[in-house]
Amino acid sequence: MHRDKILLTSILKALESSKQPFASVRYDQFGPFSQEQVIQHMLLLNDNNMIVLLEPTQETSPPFYPMTVRIAWNGHEWLEKNG
């Protein structure tokens, strides 16, 4: 799967605009992108310290839906350069 800068930026913008320190991300909020694409891009953002991804617990949600995350320093930097 190829990296998509539009999707990466969309995820980061959604997190930055949240009024909460941690946000639940729903896959259907990213238009034409599939659930698999959103998951893969969120994992890439997490791997590169742009977001902090919290593992869902059995009590709060099924695996990977929704993902609870917050934007990290590197994510803000990305948005300043690419957003």
Image: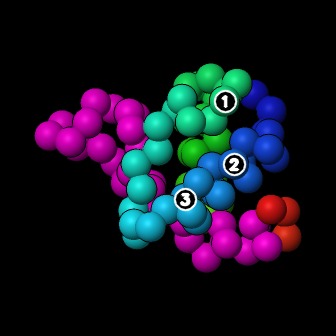
Query: Is 20 displayed left or right of 7 in the figure?
Result: left
Q: Quadrant of residue 80?
A: bottom right
Which residue was labeled with disc 3?
15
Q: Position of residue 65 (x, y in %)?
A: 38, 33
Which residue was labeled with disc 1?
31
Question: In which quadrant is the N terminus drawn?
Answer: top right
Q: Position of residue 2 (x, y in %)?
A: 80, 33
- Residue at 73 percent of width and 53 percent of height: 9
Few, some or many C-alpha atoms within 10 Å of disc 2 (few <14, some 14-19, many ≥20)?
some
Three-letter code for the amino acid on which mark 3 is drawn: Leu
Which residue was labeled with disc 2?
10
Question: In which quadrant is the C terminus drawn?
Answer: bottom right
* Range shown magenta: 52-80
**Cα gap from disc 1 to disc 3, whole angstroms:** 16 Å
Asked if one can make out residue 8 in the rendered structure from this viewpoint, the answer is yes
Q: Taking 32 as reference, is 18 above or below it?
A: below
